[in-house]
Image (cartoon, grey):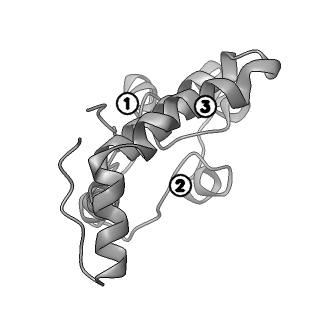
């Protein structure tokens, strides 16, 4: 299964620490990130959140709990679906526009036909938590 990287940052993330945060999965605006990485100008946590560079703002000491909560939310989903979703989001930026739907459909077909998809539907109907097997 593909690993999802979540950064739990307490305090400042500068230089290599900033680069580590930017290498995690839950960060976005590359232009803003590039500007601050290249200029070295500071950015407040509030501004980083506003620009989508930070997924959650927490009070001091709350970053690890928030990161653990995100991890639990991700882990509650089917591992095949999570892995494929991440693959589509990471790879699709380089796909030719004419092939986007075809490539995505090919990846999703495996998920839709999986035992986990059947388990997810059954759990929904039976009003219970699914038991994912990654199959």
Point out the tag, 2 or 3, that comes first from the N-terminus: 2
Question: Residue 39, image x and y in percent?
Answer: 66, 22
Q: Position of residue 126 (x, y in %)?
A: 28, 82
* CB-based contact (under 8 Å), mark 1 and mark 2: no
* Whether residue 56 is situated above or below residue 6 in the rendered picture: below
Residue 76 is drawn in which quadrant?
bottom left
Q: CA distance from mark 1 to mark 2?
A: 14 Å
On the image, which quarter does residue 14 sit in? top left
Q: Nearer the viewer, residue 13 or 127?
A: 127
Q: How many marks?
A: 3
Asked if residue 41 shows in the view, the reply is: yes
User: Which mark is on residue 45?
Assistant: 2
Residue 79 x %, y %: 29, 45
Q: For the point 71% across and 31% down, which residue is it?
A: 101
Residue 124 position in % (x across, y down):
36, 76
Which residue lies under the disc numbered 1? 17
Give neighbour class at mark 1: few <14, some 14-19, many 20+ (Cα, 10 Å). few
Residue at image location 24% in from the left, 80% down from the top:
128
Of label 3 and label 1, which has the lower sequence position? 1
For label 3, the SS is helix
Look at 34% across and 41% down and name the residue there. Answer: 80
Q: Quadrant of the N terminus?
A: top left
Q: Residue furthest right?
A: 98
Q: Quadrant of residue 62?
A: bottom left
Quote the CA–CA distance across marks 3 and 1: 34 Å
Q: Considering depth in this image, is 101 or 4 the residue closer to the camera? A: 101
The kind of secondary structure element at disc 2 is helix
In the picture, the quarter occupied by the C terminus is: top left
| Residue highlighted by disc 3 | 104
The correct choice, above or below, for 99 with respect to 128 in the image is: above
Tell me the tag on residue 130.
none
């Amino acid at each position: 299964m593909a690993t999802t990287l979540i950064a739990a940052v307490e305090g400042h993330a500068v230089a290599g620490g900033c680069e580590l945060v930017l290498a995690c999965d839950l960060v976005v605006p590359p232009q803003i990130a590039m500007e601050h990485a290249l200029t070295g100008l500071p950015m407040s946590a509030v501004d980083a959140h506003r620009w989508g560079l930070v997924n959650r703002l927490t009070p001091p000491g709350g970053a690890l709990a928030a990161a653990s909560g995100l991890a639990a939310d991700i882990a509650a989903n089917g591992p095949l679906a999570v892995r494929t979703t991440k693959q589509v989001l990471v790879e699709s930026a380089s796909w030719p526009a004419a092939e986007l739907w075809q490539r995505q459909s090919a990846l999703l077909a495996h998920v839709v036909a999986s035992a986990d998809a059947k388990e997810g539907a059954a759990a929904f109907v039976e009003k219970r938590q699914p038991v994912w097997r990654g199959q």
